[in-house]
Image (cartoon, grey):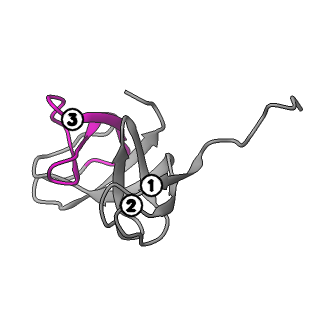
Amino acid sequence: MAKNYVQPGETLTLIAPRAVSSGSGLLVGALFAVALADAASGSQVEARRVGVWDLAKAAGAWTQGQKVYWDNAAFNLTTTATSNTLVGVVAQAQASADTVGRVLLTGQVS
Protein backbone atom coordinates (compact mmCIF):
# COMPACT_ATOMS: atom_id res chain seq x y z
CA MET A 1 0.00 0.00 0.00
CA ALA A 2 1.24 3.48 -0.80
CA LYS A 3 2.53 5.38 2.23
CA ASN A 4 0.34 8.40 1.46
CA TYR A 5 -2.98 6.45 1.55
CA VAL A 6 -5.22 7.74 4.35
CA GLN A 7 -8.63 6.00 4.25
CA PRO A 8 -11.30 4.69 1.84
CA GLY A 9 -13.39 7.89 2.08
CA GLU A 10 -16.88 6.41 2.26
CA THR A 11 -17.16 7.73 5.84
CA LEU A 12 -15.63 11.07 6.81
CA THR A 13 -15.49 13.23 9.91
CA LEU A 14 -17.24 16.49 8.99
CA ILE A 15 -18.12 19.67 10.84
CA ALA A 16 -21.91 19.83 11.14
CA PRO A 17 -23.17 22.97 9.34
CA ARG A 18 -26.30 22.92 11.53
CA ALA A 19 -27.70 20.68 14.26
CA VAL A 20 -28.22 17.27 12.64
CA SER A 21 -29.88 14.05 13.74
CA SER A 22 -28.54 10.60 13.05
CA GLY A 23 -29.72 9.58 9.59
CA SER A 24 -30.25 13.08 8.25
CA GLY A 25 -28.51 14.59 5.25
CA LEU A 26 -25.98 17.37 5.49
CA LEU A 27 -24.10 19.45 2.96
CA VAL A 28 -20.61 20.75 3.72
CA GLY A 29 -19.49 22.84 0.77
CA ALA A 30 -20.02 20.53 -2.21
CA LEU A 31 -19.81 17.37 -0.05
CA PHE A 32 -23.11 15.62 0.79
CA ALA A 33 -23.33 12.87 3.39
CA VAL A 34 -25.65 11.28 5.94
CA ALA A 35 -24.94 11.87 9.64
CA LEU A 36 -24.23 8.65 11.54
CA ALA A 37 -24.94 10.29 14.93
CA ASP A 38 -26.64 13.38 16.34
CA ALA A 39 -24.42 16.47 16.28
CA ALA A 40 -24.69 20.11 17.31
CA SER A 41 -23.91 22.82 14.80
CA GLY A 42 -20.15 23.28 14.51
CA SER A 43 -19.27 19.94 16.09
CA GLN A 44 -17.66 16.93 14.45
CA VAL A 45 -19.88 14.17 13.10
CA GLU A 46 -19.10 10.96 11.29
CA ALA A 47 -21.00 10.95 8.00
CA ARG A 48 -21.38 8.42 5.16
CA ARG A 49 -21.10 9.61 1.53
CA VAL A 50 -22.34 6.51 -0.31
CA GLY A 51 -24.89 3.72 -0.10
CA VAL A 52 -28.65 3.29 -0.26
CA TRP A 53 -30.58 5.44 2.21
CA ASP A 54 -34.15 6.41 3.08
CA LEU A 55 -34.06 10.21 3.32
CA ALA A 56 -36.45 13.17 3.57
CA LYS A 57 -38.12 13.87 0.22
CA ALA A 58 -39.87 16.87 -1.31
CA ALA A 59 -43.32 16.44 -2.84
CA GLY A 60 -43.40 14.96 -6.33
CA ALA A 61 -43.32 11.48 -7.83
CA TRP A 62 -39.95 9.80 -8.34
CA THR A 63 -39.00 7.16 -10.91
CA GLN A 64 -36.22 4.65 -10.44
CA GLY A 65 -32.89 5.90 -11.79
CA GLN A 66 -33.93 9.56 -11.77
CA LYS A 67 -31.29 12.03 -10.50
CA VAL A 68 -31.90 13.54 -7.07
CA TYR A 69 -30.58 16.77 -5.60
CA TRP A 70 -30.16 18.08 -2.06
CA ASP A 71 -32.20 21.21 -1.29
CA ASN A 72 -30.10 22.85 1.42
CA ALA A 73 -32.89 25.31 2.34
CA ALA A 74 -35.61 22.67 2.88
CA PHE A 75 -33.12 19.96 3.99
CA ASN A 76 -34.61 17.30 1.72
CA LEU A 77 -34.11 15.60 -1.62
CA THR A 78 -35.78 16.81 -4.77
CA THR A 79 -35.69 16.13 -8.50
CA THR A 80 -35.26 19.87 -9.14
CA ALA A 81 -31.71 20.61 -10.25
CA THR A 82 -31.85 24.42 -10.14
CA SER A 83 -30.00 25.82 -7.09
CA ASN A 84 -29.59 22.31 -5.62
CA THR A 85 -26.69 19.83 -5.31
CA LEU A 86 -26.66 16.52 -7.21
CA VAL A 87 -26.22 13.68 -4.70
CA GLY A 88 -27.38 10.47 -6.39
CA VAL A 89 -30.25 8.62 -8.02
CA VAL A 90 -33.63 7.24 -7.03
CA ALA A 91 -33.28 3.59 -5.97
CA GLN A 92 -37.02 2.93 -5.65
CA ALA A 93 -39.98 4.72 -7.25
CA GLN A 94 -41.89 6.94 -4.82
CA ALA A 95 -45.39 8.43 -4.89
CA SER A 96 -45.81 12.21 -4.91
CA ALA A 97 -47.17 12.28 -1.34
CA ASP A 98 -44.30 10.21 0.12
CA THR A 99 -42.17 12.21 2.56
CA VAL A 100 -39.27 9.72 2.50
CA GLY A 101 -37.51 8.41 -0.59
CA ARG A 102 -35.00 5.60 -1.15
CA VAL A 103 -31.87 6.86 -2.89
CA LEU A 104 -28.45 5.64 -3.93
CA LEU A 105 -25.85 8.20 -2.86
CA THR A 106 -23.08 8.02 -5.40
CA GLY A 107 -20.52 10.13 -3.55
CA GLN A 108 -19.93 12.62 -6.36
CA VAL A 109 -18.89 16.15 -5.55
CA SER A 110 -20.56 18.84 -7.60
State the separation of the CA atoms marked 3 and 1.
Answer: 20 Å
Please tell me which residue lies in front, 24 or 60: 24
Q: Is residue 70 magenta?
A: yes
- Quadrant housing the C terminus: top left
State the separation of the CA atoms marked 1 and 2.
Answer: 6 Å
Mark 2 residue type: Gly
Q: Is residue 10 magenta?
A: no
Is label 1 in contact with label 2 (beta carbons under 8 Å)?
A: yes
- The residue indicated by pointer 2 is 42
Q: Which tag, 3 or 1, sits closer to the chain's start? A: 1
Residue 35, label in figure: none
Of all residues, the one furthest to the front in this rendering is: 42
Q: Nearer the viewer, mark 3 or mark 2?
A: 2
Q: Secondary structure at mark 2?
A: loop
Residue 15, label in figure: 1
Q: Is residue 18 above or below residue 82?
A: below
Q: Is residue 78 above or below residue 97?
A: above
Q: Is residue 70 left or right of residue 60?
A: right
- The residue indicated by pointer 3 is 84
Position of residue 44 measured from the top left corner of the image (x, y, whole percent): 49, 61
